[in-house]
Amino acid sequence: MRRICVVIGSRANYGSIKSVMRAVTAHPDLQLQLVVGASAVLDRFGSVVDLIEQDGFRVDARVNLIIEGETPVTMAKSTGLGLLELPTLFDLLKPDVVVSVGDRFETMATAVAAVYMNIPVAHTMGGEVSGTIDESIRHAVTKLAHLHFPANRLAGERIVRMGEDPASVHVVGCPRIDLVAEIVTAGDGLDAVWLEREGVGGHVDLSTPFLLVSQHPVTTEYGEGEAQVAETLAALDELAMPTIMLWPNVDAGSEDVARGMRKFRERRRPDHIRFYKNFPVELYTRLMRRAACLVGNSSAPIREGAFLGTPAVNIGTRQQGRERGANVVDVPHERARIVEAVRAQVAHGPYPSEHIYGDGQAGSRIAEILAGAPLKLQKQIAY
């Protein structure tokens, strides 16, 4: 039985790998090992580890990988801390394969630690193009990984052009779409009690058209986060629509974005905006489906949004170059342009579903490949 170790470092990580974790748990030839760390174990980011355990998964290890401060310096040091802590856990757990998810700094630490310990690395969501430092990290992990699970054909082709063995590249779709596909068939009821209990700010009536907003720092534009989110918040103030807004992730510049949000909330005290640290994956997906428009710079409106057909306004450069569907309109960090785009998207309404990032079966495909694929440690550029 192969031991498959999944390392989760954030709320986005969990949503991006949950269906794989379920499929690995259900597979007779696989055993799931779970390491949770970084922002996923911090209360101020919503204690994602608690949601993971509530979903029925056993966490084998919790690890603190975050050096507080959310600057480029602390982000680099946190990566180093991961390299100090993760090898000890891998040595104890002795996995046959380590799964590295996406493109965050803990993803880099995970991949480097595993390859130095001669543990094959499987990488999900590689080969994609986007803005910020994430693209560089994503491609670096691709060069470290032994098994590749890109979300679509173009991403797979990029991985092969990077010199990876075509036999190691498996175009399976994005595991995040698996959860979306389930929600589409299971209904979209919302947990009103949870939403009222967990959030802070105004009461949001979700029976009327509402906005779902998620804006993170752009690491290559460090120092501009507060001014950037101020433009978004000014637009939301002018729109005056019921709005659910998430606090930013832990990347460098997070405190700048959070500071801008706190100032706005304290000075304006908007009664139409409610702020949240985190959401259960299924609830967030249902909110995405029900929203009149998705706003911000998260990848979710582009990935899941295309499948759902939910109108989206993507702000700034964080998702620059990422493949997108007809549901997305791109605007700069300018309040007037944001207001104009949101109003147009709300008036347009839902778009046809596009399966740019998969069909909802990625998890089971990945588990099957993990169970049977040859595990070769020695890598060479494919000529």
Image: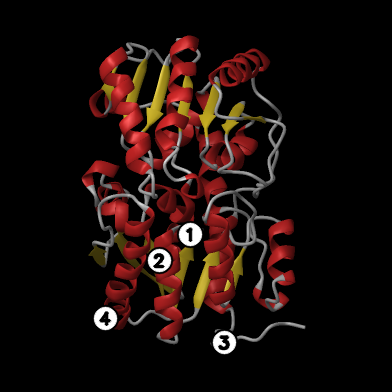
Q: Which residue of the protein is positioned furthest toward the right in this rendering?
A: 383
Task: Mark 4 and mark 3 in contact? Answer it, CB < 8 Å.
Answer: no
- Decide which of 318, 292 is in the foreground and name it: 318
- Decide which of 247, 334 is in the foreground and name it: 334
Of callouts 4 and 3, the N-terminal one:
4
Task: Mark 2 and mark 1 in contact? Answer it, CB < 8 Å.
Answer: yes
Q: Which mark is residue 6?
A: 2
Of callouts 4 and 1, the N-terminal one:
1
Of callouts 2 and 4, the N-terminal one:
2
How crowded is the residue under tag 1: few (<14 C-alpha within 10 Å), some, or many (20+)?
A: many
> Which residue is tagged 4?
92
Residue kind at label 2, given as amino acid type? Val
Residue 284 visible: yes
Question: In 3D space, how far apart are the residues under numbered discs 2 and 1 (Cα atoms)?
Answer: 9 Å
Horizontal and vertical percent position of residue 44: 24, 42
Can you tell which of label 4 and label 1 is closer to the viewer?
A: 4
The residue tagged with tag 2: helix, strand or loop?
Answer: strand
Question: In 3D space, how far apart are the residues under numbered discs 2 and 4 (Cα atoms)?
Answer: 14 Å
Q: Which mark is residue 376?
A: 3
Question: In 3D space, how far apart are the residues under numbered discs 1 and 3 (Cα atoms)?
Answer: 21 Å
Q: Which residue of the protein is positioned furthest toward the front in this rendering?
A: 223
Q: Which mark is residue 20?
A: 1
Of callouts 1 and 3, the N-terminal one:
1
Q: Quadrant of the C terminus?
A: bottom right
Residue kind at label 1, given as amino acid type? Val
Residue 188 visible: no
| Direction from residue 67 to residue 316 in the image, left or right | right
The residue tagged with tag 1: helix, strand or loop?
Answer: helix
Can you tell which of label 1 and label 3 is closer to the viewer?
A: 3
Horizontal and vertical percent position of residue 251: 39, 49
Q: Is residue 338 above or below residue 80?
A: above
Of callouts 2 and 1, the N-terminal one:
2
